[in-house]
Image: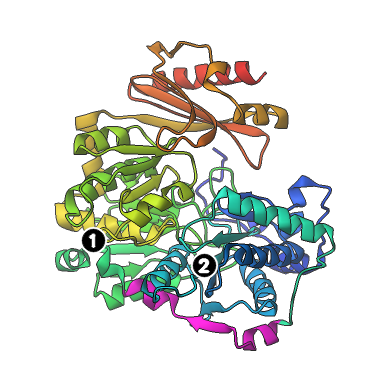
Amino acid sequence: MASRAGTVALPQDLVDITALLDAYFDVTPDLGDPAQRVAFGTSGHRGSSLKASFNEPHILAITQAIVEYRGRQGITGPLFIGRDTHALSEPAQNSALEVLAANGVTVLVDARHGYTPTPALSHAILKYNREAAPGTPQADGIVVTPSHNPPGDGGFKYNPPHGGPADTDATGWIADRANQLLENGLRGVKRMPLNDALAADTTGKFDFLSSYVDDLPSVLNLEAIRNAGVRIGADPMGGASVDYWGEIGERHQLNLTVVNPTVDPQWAFMTLDWDEKIRMDCSSPSAMASLIKRMAAGADGTAAYDVATGNDADADRHGIVTPDGGLMNPNHYLAVAIDYLYRNRSGWNPESVVGKTLVSSSIIDRVAAGLGRKLVEVPVGFKWFVPGLLSGEGAFGGEESAGASFNKLDGSVWTTDKDGILLALLASEITAVTGQSPSQLYKGLTDQFGAPVYARIDAAASREQKSKLGKLSAADVTATSLAGEEITAKLTEAPGNGASIGGLKVVTENAWFAARPSGTEDVYKIYAESFKGADHLAQVQQEAKALVDGVIA
């Protein structure tokens, strides 16, 4: 932990917005450098104009590639587009509009000229496609956001008609075509001036906020929150949910305070993350230090709010702060949310499964078993939850990085992308209905199922070693025990769907670890957990590193 972690940013920590925007328009990427080519990770293409990895040529090429992908797939309905509060998001959205309009694509932009959370865009796509007459062309969308990344970053995500993140087949084709267009000097990219694009007959408006906020009673028991008078403190953290929270409180008559309505592309009000970078990670105690401090008990011994919440810049992640427990570990809150929802959603399919990523806590496995529900464990990436959420067969999907969504009260789909606003409001519903905070309920779960200790560490690895890790088979691992326990499973494919995990997971009765290569750094990540305490976890981590290093050497 860096010495200034959790302290308010200083002037030297702030990005130069003028330089950032100038570089977006003026810098041409060097395609001989892999870091400057288009590359889609689990959440779209990300980079910084100052590093020549997120510049106007990238966005023009990616958008043209999306247009051509839509044509290949027969997607001819409207394309919803929204942006978050990062400085690069507005110019990138404008660049995309220039290409979309020139290609004759019907585009719907925010009617309020504001910011659009990722879940609001997913909700809009699904609502349009659900309510459209049979045979009507399907809608899809683009979200311009790098999520919780630092202020100097930009991001660009494509969501096809199912409303969730595009799968690897789609993103692989789009990235390859975009790089081809870049290599050809953008020949093949259609474009028109921004003013003409905004005035085009194909460019329309859509009220994302009203569509989302007015539909919340279909997915949450807002009446219980209202009747219980739960005091909610909602911190948008300078992100796209800033106008949504005030409207949620007003329209649904909740006792809700928007803790900090400031929008600042430098995020000068933020406390620094663990590495002294500004990062809007609502699962990080350092980034959430201001909200945690607000929840400290006052002179009368009570906290300012019954529940306080934070969201990242595109509001697809959630952070939950309680008076008795402070900032909840995302895994802990997922376990509480699952236990509560499957006991309190009578309209859900009684056979619906519990979805989690394979690096999420195993207390979720035990909670699911206690509920009598099947657990479906998938690789990292929210896209794996899309089919279940659409069909109702997987009414909840969650991942360890504080991202989750769940279905409406009647079991139908709400969003197929992560929804941090939804999960934040659920904490208030849980408090209202049970009379206990989510952290108190988690303590009850650990009394029943045991208390896991969970951590993630990074270990150095070359590009060749990372590639080898991503291609491992279970047969490559010859060890039979881990930290004194017999190994019960060696996984290179997710048990829930048979998809490659791009790494390795090793399981024992009371512990596990998973190792995956980083997509952006020369490291691999070791996720590990033990139900036998911190010392046993340290032993698991030590042996995990030795085991992985041995098979990728």
Q: Measuring 67% from the left and 60% from the top, which residue is drawn there?
A: 15
504 over 263 or under it: above or below: above
Q: Is residue 332 left or right of residue 463?
A: left
Residue 123 located left or right of residue 352: right
| Label located before the other in sequence (2 or 1) | 2
In the rendered structure, does residue 221 fall within the stretch colored magenta? no
**Quarter location, residue 104:** bottom right
Q: Nearer the viewer, mark 2 or mark 1?
A: 2
Q: Are marks 2 and 1 in contact (CB under 8 Å)?
A: no
Which of the pair 482/480 is nearer the observer? 480
Residue 200 lies in magenta, yes or no? yes
Tally the marks.
2
Residue 30 lies, with reference to residue 74, above or below; the image says above
Examine the rendering and report whether any part of residue 278 can be seen.
no
Question: Residue 424: where, in percent of width, then height?
Answer: 34, 57
Q: Residue at x 40, y 73 (%)?
A: 134
Q: Nearer the viewer, residue 276 or 203?
A: 203
Q: Which mark, by number, is residue 409?
A: 1
SS at mark 2? strand
Kindly identify the amino acid type of the residue bearing the numbered disc 2: Asp
Q: How would you rate the neighbour count of disc 1 (Cα within 10 Å): few for under 14, some for 14-19, many for 20 or more?
A: some
Check disc 1 and give the amino acid type.
Leu
The residue labelled by disc 2 is 140
Q: Is residue 474 left or right of residue 407?
A: right
Query: Which region is colored magenta?
Result: 194-214
- Element type at marker 1? loop
Q: Is residue 484 visible?
A: yes
